[in-house]
Image (cartoon, rainbow, N blue to C red):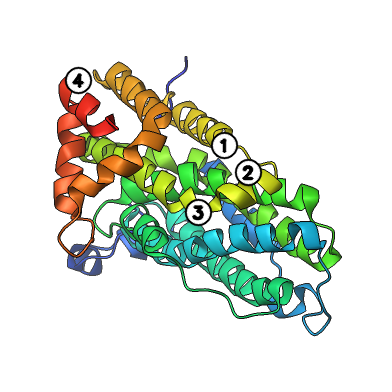
Amino acid sequence: MKRRAVGVARDTASFSWRHVVFGGGVFDTSGDHPNKKGWEIFELGQRSFWAVPTAIAWDAPVREDPKYAEPIAAMLSFLCPGEKAAVTGASYISGLVRSEEAKFYFVEQALEEAKHYDALRRLIPKITGRPMDPPSPWVRLLYSFGVVDRDDVAFMMGNINIIGEHLANQIFHKINHVAKDESVRKILALIGKDESRHIGAGQRFFPEVYPEFKARRAQILAKNVATTIILACAAYDLVGPLRVLDIDLSKIMDAMYQHYEDVTGSLPPFPEHALRDAIVGMVRRGTPRVIKTLEKSTDENGHVELRRFVHACEEAITSPRALRDLLAA
């Protein structure tokens, strides 16, 4: 398999006093874009712009099929907080990347995530006829711990653009197949078009953060194991809506992680790649039993102690016995 070039040859995006004094970085005005595909996807976002206030007639009623209205609203309510968390994540990424192409693109993505959140926040109450419910503790945990780490650009880009966007886009696509109301379908189609571009951006820009990925791969693997388990718990209350909408979460997760392998598989490999693949496979098969195991990582008030939880995941990626313990019912 052909390996992609990794890293950034010349810094055209960083901001520091060295760049103020000597030039370069954010003050590079050469317009040289070695990541041509990355620049093209930034330009595509400008050509594909749509505005939430004029996307549909917001004063018109939504008349969704009663069979699907509540399940659709439940799934959109699950995804909506993730769109807002992705605004923060994409904003952080834009300040950590070292190419003009990536910096400009992720600023653009942050705006698009804000539009998605705004559109869904308006749409969900129109479907149900009541205010949107606040996200559950598990959903809040998923979209904080599993998405945002302002010091780890590779983790954020991987979990937002490669994993999260792929997961969300599959769900949006499935919902749009059963939705009947034209306003619902139009909003989901507009969001889905953006999400497809965000997925493509993960493929274009992740090689640029390969050095950071290489340096923090053990921590990223541990956090991804933990995030997979948290995702299973966050989606536990969605069993009914998933069934009505004919959404198989296990198949979606398989496709999501296959996409992650497709993106990272063309990068220089690590010695522990085979072990990582085995771990992810076991986690995906064992997630129903993991929900009970999570009780071991909660304090007296029922709050998850992330330090203890991640430590268990770190042990699991090096010890088969620890992994069995983590996945034990």
Report how far apart the C-alphas of labels 4 and 3 lie in the structure: 30 Å
Residue at numbered disc 3? 237
The disc at residue 170 is 2
Q: Earlier in the sequence, mark 1 or mark 2?
A: 2
Q: Quadrant of residue 19?
A: bottom left
Q: Earlier in the sequence, mark 4 or mark 1?
A: 1
Residue drawn at point x = 79 percent, y = 56 percent? 179
Q: Position of residue 150 (x, y in %)?
A: 28, 60
Residue at numbered disc 1? 252
Q: Nearer the viewer, residue 143 or 136?
A: 136
Report how far apart the C-alphas of labels 2 and 4 lie in the structure: 32 Å
Q: Which secondary structure lies at badge 4?
A: helix
Q: Residue furthest bottom?
A: 59
Q: Earlier in the sequence, mark 1 or mark 3?
A: 3
Considering only vertical position in the picture, is 172 above or below 225?
below
Mark 1 Cα shell of 10 Å, populated few (<14), some (14-19), many (≥20): some
Q: Nearer the viewer, residue 10 or 197?
A: 197
**Direction from residue 195 to residue 320 in the image, left or right:** left
Q: Amino acid at mark 3?
A: Asp
Q: Which secondary structure lies at badge 3?
A: helix
Residue at numbered disc 4? 320
